[in-house]
Image (spheres, helix red, strand yellow):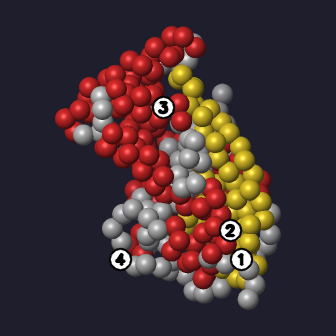
Amino acid sequence: MSESNNQGFNLDEPSLISVLDELPFWSAPFGIKLLEKIVPKKNMAVLDIGFGTGFPIIELAMRLGDTCKIYGMDPWNAASDRAREKMRAYGIKNCEILPAETQYVASLPCNNDHIPLPDQTIDLVVSNNGLNNVADLDRTLSECGRIMKPGGQLVFTMNLDGTMVEFYNVMENVLAAHHLADAISAMHQHIYEKRRPLDEVLSLLRHTGFSIGSVDHDLFFYKFADGTALFRHFFIRLAFLDAWKKIVPVEKQESIFDEIEIRINEISNELGYFRLSVPFVVIGSTLNTK
């Protein structure tokens, strides 16, 4: 039984139903820990880097209230449009999504090399598994420092370089069996570019003027019935599979991934399932006062 008058919301309205999933499953474990680190206060100015279809910018806007202003940056234009529609449906007035053409928070063409906000105007910068995908992390952190007030906070999550190690172990074994040393090197470079070592990230934070307040480690698992289910999973196909395939020479991609799937299926038959580990951290830092 549905209700048609919950604070004016019609629970049968298609336009409302279509905007109720701003937090994808992949983002949820990171996001829960991120929100635990944020202390909501009135009159805050906040920037969210890499919010996708609306998380955490929408949740932050609602939790912080109308005395606060929340800005968002994300290079995915279609996702930003969907986030705007959610804000409209939810009645959120305290958010501003910065124009995509001014952003550089991913490896995409861009026009400017700075965050389009004035110096020392932001109290809090957050990013839920987004900063590890920027084109130039050093530059991005420097820009975060420029726009933040002295003593401002930067809180972000990032998955670590051991993410999905079970898959990469299988892939490396298959590549080695086919004597594809260059592809193995490309795989390790791919992991490094997507998931920088934690010590390196902490060093960059200190270099750009931040003090590390906390580094909280956590872990979750993706479990699949077998390799076939893994490769058919929507989010794996959306966010990972193309990048994995680019590691392998084009003419060998089909045969290599068929073999990877077979090997994962064999592991699944022995263990009952195939598990991918996703270790991550929540980093809380503060901009040094000058």
SS of the residue under disc 3: helix
Give the numbered dot on residue 111: 4
Is 78 positioned to the left or the right of 163 in the image? left
Return the residue at label 3.
169
Q: Separation of disc 1 and disc 3 at Cα?
A: 39 Å
Q: Which amino acid does label 1 sit on?
A: Leu
In the depicted view, which residue is nearer to us: 45 or 237? 237
Give the numbered dot on residue 154: 2
Q: Where is residue 140 in the image (x, y as percent from the top left)?
A: 53, 72
Q: Where is residue 4 in the image (x, y as percent from the top left)?
A: 64, 40
Give the numbered dot on residue 287: 1
Q: What residue type is labelled 3?
A: Asn
Is 135 positioned to the left or the right of 19 in the image? left
The N terminus: image quadrant:
top right
SS of the residue under disc 2: strand
Q: Separation of disc 4 and disc 1 at Cα?
A: 27 Å
* Viewer can see residue 8: no
Disc nearer the start of the sequence (4/1) = 4
Is 53 positioned to the left or the right of 204 in the image? left
Q: Which residue is drawn at 44% across and 71% down?
A: 103
**Pointer 4 and pointer 3: residues touching (CB < 8 Å)?**
no
Q: Where is residue 114 in the image (x, y as percent from the top left)?
A: 47, 79
Disc nearer the start of the sequence (4/3) = 4
Q: Which residue is drawn at 42% across and 58% down?
A: 76
Image quadrant assignment for residue 284: bottom right
